[in-house]
Image (cartoon, rainbow, N blue to C red):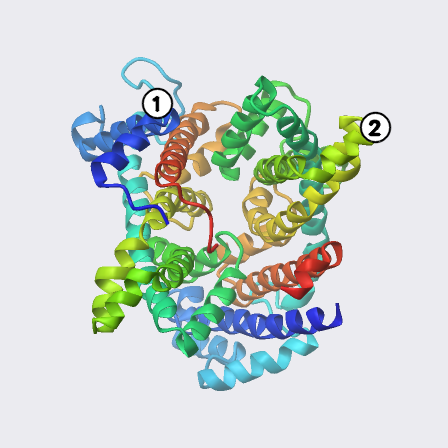
Amino acid sequence: MRGYLRRRLLHVVPVAFGVVTVVFFLLHLLPGDPVEIMLGESAVPALKEELRRELHLDRPVHVQYAEFLAGLPRGDLGVSFRSREPVAREIARRFPATLLLASASIAVAILVALPLGVLAATRKGKAADYLSGAAAMLSLSIPNFLLGPLLVLVFSVQLGLLPVSGYGTARHLVLPAATLGTGMAALMMRMIRATLLEELRKEYVTAATARGLSHRAAVALHALRNALVPVATVLGLSFGAVLAGSVIAETIFSWPGIGRLLIQAIDARDYPLVQGCVLVIALCTVLVNLATDLLCARLDPRIRYE
Amino acid sequence: MNEPPRRAALLRRTARHRGAAAGLAVLAVLVLAALFAPVLAPCDPYAQLLDEGLSGPGGTHWLGQDKFGRDVLSRLIHGARLSLAVGIGTVSLSLAIGLLAGSLAGFLGGWTDRVFTSACDVLLAFPGILLAIGIAAVRGPSFGNVLFALSVLGWVGYARVIRAQVLKVKAMEFVESARAVGAPPSRMLLTHILPNALSPILVEATFGISRAIVAEAGLSFLGLGVAAPAASWGSMIGEGRHFLFVAPHLVTAPGAAILLTVMAFNFVGDGLRDALDVRDDGR
């Protein structure tokens, strides 16, 4: 396991470095003067110069890049143009809300996908299989910027069961988590169905039932356990998509997380904050992918020797 | 590897897939609507009738009017043009880059392949449309910027599939034979390897168009897509969601258009995958 860990870390470090580099140059090398975009073309030249100095944009790009890299180990992501607070502090304040939403979405996805996936696999070719397959196709096709308002329309406007937006109680969490979790549930359901069908065809399941184990017990105790390794991979890899999706879900439901912070930063043309949010979301994705790989290698020793 | 089916046979096999046939029918209607939008749209999609803002479906405005009194159906029909243009434009641009990068990485191998793989790993670390949001935020809303923002990441998927296919086909006997008779590398790549590596790309591109349409609509929903007042399905939902209590049709009409289009492309993609017997290798 140690060798595998070393190999994965050696892979992750350059990727993380590449992510930092892309995010930095995203702001600094694309056409257009960020200062002019922030203040407008007609701003007083002295004001532009002052802001340029403040954001260190008056220095050569390679010096700015070196400063940016040097600041990262200290957690220095620059200063927000809007609030004049350190970007890292603003993000740290909003991060727990996003983490809560992401965790709730994953919980929704598991709670929906696991029973439906098992049902579809064990009833292959029957009505339950076709119905859950159709539901999965619909869920995969519906974008979250459409699903969110539709859920609000049904559960808030028509039925009056849940709040339209906001933060603070479990009721506020239901609609945003369902919006983010639905697509992932569909993906997981398909994956559970496919991997479980493959496992059910293997001889150890027949052997287990031949030993007197009921079919249900053979599925639950043996086949499902083995089928869950690829599902764990999908779950981990979906976490990044959930973080990215949170930008839209948090905007719809006024959820005070990092996704909404990013959109607020874009509206305020607060580029240091935009840069910080994109960087933190991307680096979190890299770390979660690493954790997923390590978890899967622990669950399935064959992975370590590939 | 299966021999790639000829075009007519491929179309027949795809159309035999019930979902794909339905998808193709929906897409045909969509393309016709987009092509003849100025003729088909009952009103000018930009004409404002402020007194009639947020009116429900009925009368001359079959799908109602938005907050500025603009005809929703006309904006929906013109929005089809934009969605298809973004979908096809993004896939074309991404495919061109992906084809070049993936085939060179797979064919040349060595450090070219290592640089390619590292670049892919870095770009794939950006989840969903996050990178596109960042680029669109810096460059501002416009059609060209949306294409650029979506293609920056869009090419990676195609390039990886092409690289995997090139690696597979390159090891086949007929390529070895071509090399043995002294075919130059460029001819081997262009006439022997690539034509035999393109089937999975057709499937990937079909799904890619629907992904690009959704991504554009997502960017427009956030106000980062094409500039107002252009009719975009995403911005129609973005504007309409503020009036869910009084005018839900402003969300449901463009929402249905997006859902129908995405499902149509997904069904056609599924049908093509079955017809070509493509497996998801290399991704």
Residue A31 shows in the view:
no
Q: Amino acid at mark 1?
A: Glu
* Left or right: B189 as drawn, with respect to A137: left
Q: Secondary structure at mark 2?
A: loop
The residue pinned by badge 1 equals B52
**Circle nearer the viewer, 2 or 1:** 2
Q: Front-most of B169 and B256?
A: B169
User: What subunit carries mark 1?
Assistant: B
- The residue at which mark 2 appears reads as A212
Query: Tag 2, which chain?
Result: A
Locate residue A185: give its quadrant: top right
**Quarter of the image that includes the N terminus of chain A:** bottom right
**B204 up-or-down from B27: above or below:** below
Label 2 sits on what residue type? Gly
Position of residue A207 in the picture relative to residue A138 (left or right): right
Q: Residue B177 in the image: state x and y as whole percent.
A: 27, 66
Are the residues under marks 2 and 1 on the same chain? no
Name the outermost residue toward the right.
Answer: A212
- Image x and y of residue A216, in percent: 77, 27
- Left/right placement of residue B234 relative to residue B30 reads right
- Residue B13, x across and y down, in percent: 30, 32
